[in-house]
Structures are given as structure tokens and as C-alpha cells.
């Protein structure tokens, strides 16, 4: 009896081990047959970043720009660029793509780079601004016509004109300001502002300046002219001609009257 107990215990342990092994084998078989439910970890499922460089660039209108879109994705699946600008060449590497954008003329454009990695798409955005500060701001010498000064200011080679504000100042005070927001051209332009300023005694000998300012959504670019002084001598050519004629006529009248008085005086002297 004592011998049968250990023997029966060994039989039970062997049966349990055999059943457990079968259960483990069945579990392994189920795991292999359900392949898609428990995928093995992959490098591409890890988070990745997308960068575009430069993120901000400003160029004169008509220039071309290169943008580089890069990623930390080890197996880049797809890359696209969304923009309204005209595209040129494209270069690419294992984890980067460079795009050329041609003839940039819109004052401000957003460019979106999309990269797909392991089925996940991420985005980076850049902004391109095209502008040209005034090449020169020239205020002509004021011309006096009647009771008004004619002021003429020339702003040359500026873009975008629709963001331009031209201001005339006398001393430190604004006498006139005009925004050209109605202008929609996409090329460099020359702008001339003409303004008639009525004269007052305290306006004389004060400096007048012309200021051109581009207000580009917070980026302010400006330039100003050399000062001009208001004087009574600032006559127009017609006024100068009329003044010369008037002076000549007055001198002629004075000479005639003087000659008459001189003849009368000599005649009285001879009778005496």
C-alpha cells in the first residue's frame, strides 16, 4: 500500500504535465493563426517629426525660392507640397525633399509640406513674403500757384503698392496721407502723389517732407524724402513769366513817368 501511493502520484503529475503542455501548444497555435490581432512592434510606428526650412522667407517679387521638407521617419512613404505658387525642380533623399518655387509675386503665400510615415501623415508650414522697399522717395521743390503750393512726391520701384501709405508732413505735423489699397498690380511700380496746399503766413519757411511706408501685416518698411522749404520764391514758370512781364511793364511806366517829370523840370529851369 505504501508503494502504490507514490506510484499513483507520479501518474497524476505526468498527466497534469501532459495536459499543460497540450494547453500551451494550443495557445501558441491560436496566437499564430490570429496573425493581425497582435502585431510585433515596428520602428515606423514610433512618433516622428516633420520640419520645413526656412519657415519664413522674404524676397523681391519675381525671385525663386527653395524649401526643404525633412522628417525623422526612417521609411518615408509619401511627401507632397500644397501651394498656389508655381513649382520648379524637386530634389529628394532618404528622409527629405526640396522644392523650388518660381517667380514669387504674391505678397504673402503659405506653403504646406505633408509627409506620410507608416500610414500617419504630418504637416509643416512655411510662409513666403514678396516685397520691395521704395528705391527712392523724392519730393519736388514746392511750386506756388496763386494761393496754393503744389507738392509732388515720387516713390520709385516699390512692391506691393496695395500696402503703401504716402504721407506729407509740414514740420512734425501730418498735412495729408493716402493709402493705395485699391492698387492690385503684382509688379514693381512707380507712384506719384500730387497735393495742393493752401498757403498761410505761418506755413512759410517750414520744412515739408514726404514719407512712404509699407505696412505688411506688422512688418513696417519705410523711407522718406529730403525736406523742402515753403517760401514766396517758389513760383511756377507761368507765375515767374507773369511776374517778369509785370515787373518789366512797371519799370517801363516808371521810366516814362520819370522822363516826363525830368522834361518838365528841365523846361521850368530853362524859363527861369
Image (cartoon, rainbow, N blue to C red):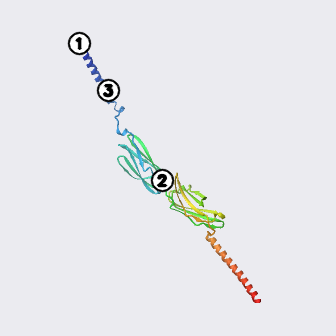
Rendered residue at 32%/26% (across/down): 27
Q: CA distance from mark 1 to mark 2?
A: 96 Å
Q: 76 or 199, which is in the foreground? A: 199
Q: CA distance from mark 3 to mark 2?
A: 63 Å
Counting from the top left corner in percent of width and height, residue 13 is at 27, 19
| Numbered mark located on residue 27 in the image | 3
Give the number of the mark in front: 1 or 3.
Answer: 1
Going by the image, does 127 lie left or right of 236?
left
Q: 207 or 217, which is in the foreground? A: 207
Q: Residue 175, can we see it?
A: no
Q: CA distance from mark 1 to mark 3?
A: 35 Å
Instruction: Give neighbour class at mark 1: few <14, some 14-19, many 20+ (Cα, 10 Å).
Output: few
Q: Is residue 50 above or below residue 107?
A: above
Give the number of the mark in front: 3 or 2.
Answer: 2
Q: Determine whether label 1 and label 3 are within 8 Å by CB.
A: no
Going by the image, does 17 lie left or right of 227?
left
Q: Quadrant of residue 162?
A: bottom right
Q: Is residue 101 above or below residue 255?
A: above
Q: Which badge, 1 or 2, comes first in the chain's sequence?
A: 1
| Numbered mark located on residue 129 in the image | 2
Q: Quadrant of residue 224?
A: bottom right
Q: Which badge, 3 or 2, comes first in the chain's sequence?
A: 3
Q: Residue 122, can we see it?
A: yes
Counting from the top left corner in percent of width and height, residue 98 is at 39, 50
| Numbered mark located on residue 4 in the image | 1
Counting from the top left corner in percent of width and height, residue 197 is at 63, 63
| Numbered mark located on residue 162 in the image | none
Give SS at disc 3. Answer: helix
Amino acid at each position: 500500500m505504501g508503494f502504490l501511493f507514490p506510484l499513483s502520484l507520479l501518474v497524476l503529475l505526468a498527466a497534469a504535465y501532459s495536459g499543460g503542455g497540450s494547453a500551451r501548444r494550443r495557445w501558441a497555435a491560436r496566437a499564430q493563426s490570429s496573425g493581425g490581432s497582435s502585431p510585433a512592434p515596428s520602428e515606423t510606428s514610433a512618433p516622428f517629426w516633420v520640419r520645413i526650412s526656412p519657415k519664413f522667407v522674404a524676397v523681391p517679387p519675381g525671385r525663386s525660392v527653395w524649401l526643404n521638407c525633412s522628417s525623422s521617419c526612417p521609411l518615408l512613404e509619401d511627401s507632397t507640397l500644397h501651394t498656389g505658387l508655381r513649382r520648379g525642380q524637386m530634389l529628394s533623399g532618404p528622409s527629405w525633399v526640396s522644392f523650388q518655387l518660381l517667380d514669387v509675386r504674391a505678397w504673402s503665400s503659405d506653403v504646406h509640406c505633408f509627409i506620410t510615415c507608416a500610414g500617419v501623415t504630418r504637416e509643416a508650414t512655411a510662409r513666403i513674403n514678396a516685397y520691395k522697399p521704395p528705391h527712392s522717395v523724392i519730393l519736388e521743390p514746392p511750386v506756388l500757384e496763386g494761393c496754393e503750393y503744389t507738392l509732388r512726391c515720387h516713390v520709385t520701384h516699390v512692391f506691393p503698392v496695395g500696402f503703401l501709405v504716402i504721407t506729407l508732413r509740414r514740420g512734425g505735423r501730418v498735412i495729408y496721407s493716402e493709402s493705395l489699397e485699391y492698387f492690385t498690380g503684382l509688379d514693381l511700380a512707380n507712384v506719384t502723389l500730387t497735393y495742393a496746399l493752401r498757403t498761410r503766413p505761418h506755413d512759410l519757411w517750414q520744412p515739408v517732407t514726404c514719407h512712404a511706408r509699407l505696412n505688411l501685416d506688422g512688418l513696417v518698411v519705410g523711407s522718406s524724402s529730403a525736406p523742402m522749404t515753403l517760401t514766396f520764391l517758389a513760383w511756377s514758370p507761368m507765375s515767374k513769366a507773369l511776374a517778369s512781364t509785370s515787373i518789366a511793364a512797371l519799370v517801363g511806366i516808371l521810366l516814362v513817368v520819370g522822363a516826363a517829370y525830368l522834361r518838365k523840370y528841365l523846361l521850368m529851369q530853362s524859363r527861369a
